[in-house]
Image: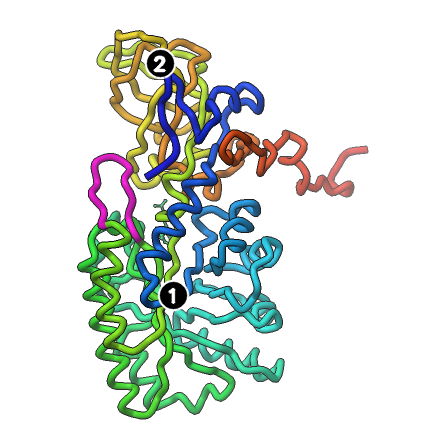
């Protein structure tokens, strides 16, 4: 599952003690396992080998250039949602022909840049966006390859902030609207080439059933438009595969593939997948250090040097992340802790009511499952430079993002001289 394990009381990432890295680069620091990352990618590819899908890693889950580069070298494509991510994807050496571009709000600059670069496909989220892409493509004198993102109105049974395929959600086009446009108004978009359809019904989904339901609904649409003579080559299933944070029992890649492959084969479409969390979630931890212990009536606060600005998932979604000391020194006494950050917000709680060995300042804690939607969602709130990122490969480790400095935080600020008293 992942390559973080305890050996002689010490937490290791692959063959390197986590404490050795933390001593060298300081805390907070994100540490990723090279082997875990690639292992998850290969697991998915193996499970789906019968279909030879395009697997486009979702950059939004973790956009570090080193990580993207590794995945691209293994043959992954990339799923992007902005011009910024396009820039990143190209810097990581991703051939444009392996890039898919979703987002409900693509600007005309972003559309033009993606067209110029000749990405594989736009995942289009509304009819007005389709018309805008058509207009940009005409202006540039090229064709725009497109998959229409369908909102199949399926509940993915996940956190309401990360469910995206129900009728109330802002994502995608309804089945009816898509069919009506394709059958009656397609001549309005002569510069668009329809490759197929796109789905992404949510994230951290632990069962195959919602995916199958969504595919069934899109499948019916595919059959109807094909009957009208429209070619449909691709179905993009999006991301969303759940992982273990606590006691979840997500379907394995194998079980997911076994459920999906026959349905896709019957539909005679080529498959695209956009996993994020599945690949990188459990491949990363956040290491932090206890600054103070504040005794309280029912439990103690362990105040640590990582906050919601480093890992926002607990504050934003009430997400559970396993917490454990990086070293067990044979000690048996435990206490109940809330692990809290230094940010001036009551929501800045990384873990609630955890039984941990008695903590002292200087003790390091590892926060697990931090590889996806961890560093990418970090901010500089409260004037805090963002953490360093480290990648471990076997016995070696590499800084893949330097810790920000206070100077980095001021770089874009401008004091207009006209406003300053001389
Ligand atoms: N494709 C599309 C169109 C997406 O919107 C997403 C994620 C993915 C693929 C990748 O999904 P994954 O395989 O990682 O589930 N910040 C939240 C998750 C937001 C997911 C947004 N979309 C969290 O920390 O749980």
> Which quadrant holds the N terminus?
top left
Cα distance in 3D space between marks 2 and 1: 44 Å
> Which quadrant holds the C terminus?
top right
Instruction: Determine which quarter of the picture holds residue 327.
Output: top left
Mark 2 lies on a secondary structure that is loop
Q: Is residue 360 left or right of residue 396?
A: left
- Tell me, for residue 155, which label it has, or none: none
Vertical comparison of 151 with 190: above or below: above
Magenta highlight range: 241-251
x, y (%) of residue 203?
31, 52
Q: Is residue 400 left or right of residue 394?
A: right
Q: Is residue 238 left or right of residue 99?
A: left
x, y (%) of residue 412?
67, 42
Q: Residue at x 40, y 46 (%)?
A: 39
Q: Which residue is mark 2?
A: 328
Q: Which residue is mark 1?
A: 53
């Amino acid at each position: 599952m992942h390559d973080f394990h305890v050996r002689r009381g010490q937490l290791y990432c692959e063959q390197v003690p986590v404490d050795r890295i933390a001593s060298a680069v300081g805390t907070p620091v994100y540490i990723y396992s090279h082997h875990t990352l690639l292992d998850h990618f290969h697991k998915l590819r193996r499970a789906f080998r019968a279909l030879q899908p395009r697997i486009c890693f979702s950059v939004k889950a973790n956009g570090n250039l080193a990580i993207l580069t590794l995945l691209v070298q293994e043959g992954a494509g990339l799923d992007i949602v902005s011009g910024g991510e396009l820039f990143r994807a190209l810097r990581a050496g991703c051939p444009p022909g392996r890039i898919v571009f979703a987002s409900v709000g693509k600007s005309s600059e972003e559309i033009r840049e993606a067209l110029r670069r000749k990405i594989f496909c736009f995942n289009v989220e509304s009819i007005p966006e389709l018309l805008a892409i058509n207009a940009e493509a005409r202006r540039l004198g090229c064709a725009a390859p497109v998959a229409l993102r369908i909102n199949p109105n399926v509940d993915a049974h996940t956190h309401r902030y990360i469910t995206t395929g129900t009728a109330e959600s802002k994502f995608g086009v309804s089945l009816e609207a898509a069919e009506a446009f394709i059958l009656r108004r397609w001549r309005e978009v002569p510069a668009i080439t329809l490759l197929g359809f796109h789905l992404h019904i949510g994230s951290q989904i632990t069962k195959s059933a919602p995916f199958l339901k969504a595919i069934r609904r899109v499948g019916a649409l595919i059959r109807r438009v094909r009957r009208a003579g429209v070619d449909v080559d691709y179905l993009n299933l999006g991301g969303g595969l759940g992982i273990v944070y606590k006691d979840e029992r997500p379907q394995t890649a194998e079980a997911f593939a076994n459920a999906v492959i026959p349905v896709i084969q019957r539909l005679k479409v080529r498959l695209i997948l956009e996993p994020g969390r599945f690949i990188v979630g459990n491949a990363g931890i956040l290491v932090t250090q206890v600054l103070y212990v504040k005794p309280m009536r029912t439990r103690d606060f362990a105040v640590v040097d990582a906050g919601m600005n480093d890992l926002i998932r607990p504050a934003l979604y009430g997400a559970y992340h396993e917490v454990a000391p990086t070293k067990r020194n044979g000690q048996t006494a435990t206490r109940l802790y809330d692990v809290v950050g230094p940010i001036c917000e009551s929501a800045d709680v990384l873990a609630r009511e955890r039984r941990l060995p008695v903590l002292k300042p200087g003790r390091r804690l590892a926060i697990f499952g931090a590889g996806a939607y961890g560093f990418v969602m970090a901010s500089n709130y409260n004037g805090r430079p963002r953490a360093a990122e480290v990648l471990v490969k076997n016995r070696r480790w590499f800084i893949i993002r330097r810790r920000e400095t206070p100077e980095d935080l001021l770089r874009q600020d401008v004091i207009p001289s006209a406003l300053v008293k001389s």
